[in-house]
Image (spheres, rainbow, N blue to C red):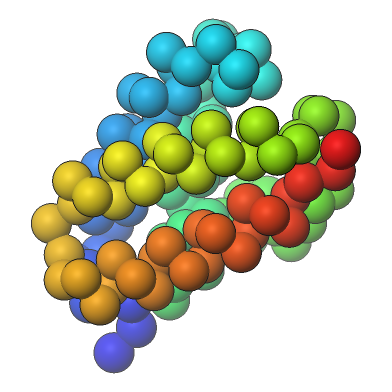
Amino acid sequence: MTLYEAVGGESFFVELVDRFYNGVEQDPLLAPMYPAEDMAGARRRLHLFLMQYFGGPDTYSQERGHPRLRRRHMPFVIGQAERDAWMNHMITSLKQADTSEDNKVQLLDYFDHVATFMMNS
């Protein structure tokens, strides 16, 4: 069973991402990186990416091609403060998620790794 299936599918990722971005929108460090007119797009792209990464449909790749995470994030200054703020919002969102602690640990391990990988400053 994939993690996508274990957490209950698409609705889990939509809710996780919605809670995450609700925090980001209020964050003085991160909010400027997300144009208000594209917030719905940012939410959709992240939930599609996470679904695909964790074993769900490949809609993200069909629509956007290869994820190229570092390349897509290079226009933004991402240092330790930005990484930590991003992680804080994702941890907060994950704590509220309705899934097992084992699933949360797997998700958190990935988020911790990718947040550090995105640092470019």
55 vs 75, left or right, is left
Q: Is residue 64 above or below residue 107?
A: above
Q: Position of residue 116 (x, y in %)?
A: 68, 54
Q: Residue at (30%, 42%) from the top-left corner?
A: 93
> In the rendered image, which quarter is residue 80 located in?
top right
Q: Residue at (85%, 43%) from the top-left corner?
A: 120
Q: Position of residue 88 (x, y in %)?
A: 44, 39
In-front residue for pair 95/42 = 95
75 vs 36, left or right, is right
Q: Is residue 107 above or below residue 41?
A: below
In-front residue for pair 56/27 = 27
**Total count of labels:** 0
Q: Residue at (34%, 71%) from the top-left corner?
A: 105
Asked whether the viewer can see residue 11, the reply is no
Q: Quadrant of the C terminus?
A: top right
Q: Position of residue 68 (x, y in %)?
A: 78, 56
Q: Residue at (41%, 44%) from the top-left corner?
A: 90
Q: Is residue 70 above or below residue 4?
A: above
